[in-house]
Image (cartoon, helix red, strand yellow):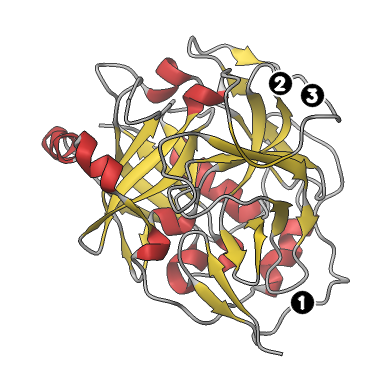
Amino acid sequence: MRRTARLVPILTLVAGSTLLSTAVAHGAAAGTTTGAAAAPAAPKPVEEEAADTKTEQKTVQHYWTEAKMEAAQPLDTLAPKKEGIRLAAAAIAAQTAADPVSVPATSPDGDTVAVARGSALARASTGARWTRGGAIAKTVGRVFFVYQGRNASCSANAVTSENKSTVITAGHCVRMGGAFHDNWAFVPGYQDGDRPYGTWVATTLYTTPQWNNGEDINYDVAAAVVAPLNGKSLTDVVGGQGVSFNQSRRQQMHSFGYPSASPYDGSKLIYCSGRAFDDILMSRDIGMNCNTTGGSSGGPWFLNFNESTGLGTLNSVNSFKYNFATGWMFGPYFGTDARAVYQAAQTTGTP
């Protein structure tokens, strides 16, 4: 049987590639470690210089006027359809063997923040506006970039990092169709056109080699390092959410983003929450009941999200939807390759 799928925000994928049996283990055993446990070997992330000079950064900031941001389109309205999906069995096997790792959240003053486990009875949502504030209202934001000469948008989130300047998003939000995007900027706390914490310009972009070389949906992960703004680093202003890798699957999760395709318009932060499930169709990703649309790509998925404080541990990002099941959102499993992208980004200096 022939099935098609589309990414939120773009791709059409066609089944037919060799898939691993559903008997393959879905992830590491439950548990968490903090600190720098040795990670299994993973392919080196692909790095791309962005606006790495002060002059280039000012050019990008001036480019993104309020009007251009409001008119930016989700990638599904701009990109051509894409067929094919490829899986890397060896890399997936390595993910199952890796130890779980978790990095704690940090406040704007640099202190580690304990993330209290959210209630097991958290309100389920398949696409409601987030109105409860907290840390999430500052760390998550819209991403703007130029894709093949056209203005486009995604979502992303600031995380704890050594350089205090790292943002996690989806691979297709930094690179698509054989090239990295231009004029890449992150606007945390975006709301109805307002930029309460400024516009942060990317100096370096990273993604997995699997996404870079073949746009393998299982590795649709990326990170951006952003330049300081007004003499301050990103997480000194908005704080950073925790991030984790090699965790057990099928847990309660929250996802966030700025969907800009109908019925949404990209002006507000939207969230979904519920228990994650495994994709048994075309990928090894995790899924959630969620009705958000294009533009939410790259938005964070959290474990242990606390709705009172707005803090959680980032453990995936919005990646794709099947066009025959638009009520499901899927995100990549954060294993050793995702961790390698994070490590490369967080140890990169900023101009």
Image-based side of 76 in relation to 159, left or right: left
- Please provide percent x and percent y for residue 203: 29, 40
Residue that mark 3 sits on: 117
Above or below, 10 relative to 340 = below
Q: Residues within 10 Å of mark 1 (few under 14, many from 20)?
A: some
Indicate whether 46 appears above or below 162: below
Instruction: Give the crowd class for mark 2: few <14, some 14-19, many >=20 residues within 10 Å.
Output: many
Q: Report helix, strand or loop for mark 1.
A: loop
Residue extending farthest to the bottom is 1
Query: Which amino acid does the dot numbered 3 rest on?
Result: Arg
Residue 269, position as x, y percentages in the image: 50, 34
Q: Residue at x 44, y 66 (%)?
A: 212
User: Is there a contact, CB below 8 Å, between mark 3 and mark 2?
Assistant: yes
Nearest to the observer: residue 123 or residue 134: 123
Q: Name the residue at 50% across, 82% down.
A: 83
Q: Quadrant of the N terminus?
A: bottom right
Q: How far is mark 3 from mark 1, CA to CA?
A: 33 Å
Name the residue that disc number 2 marks.
115
* Residue bearing the label numbered 1: 20
Q: Earlier in the sequence, mark 3 or mark 1?
A: 1
Which residue is rendered at x = 77% and y = 77% of the image? 20
State the quadrant of the C terminus.
top left
Q: Are marks 3 and 1 in contact (CB under 8 Å)?
A: no
**Which residue type does callout 2 highlight?**
Val
Q: Is residue 12 left or right of residue 302?
A: left
The spot of residue 60 in percent (x, y) is 18, 40
Between residues 200 and 87, which one lies in front from this camera angle?
200
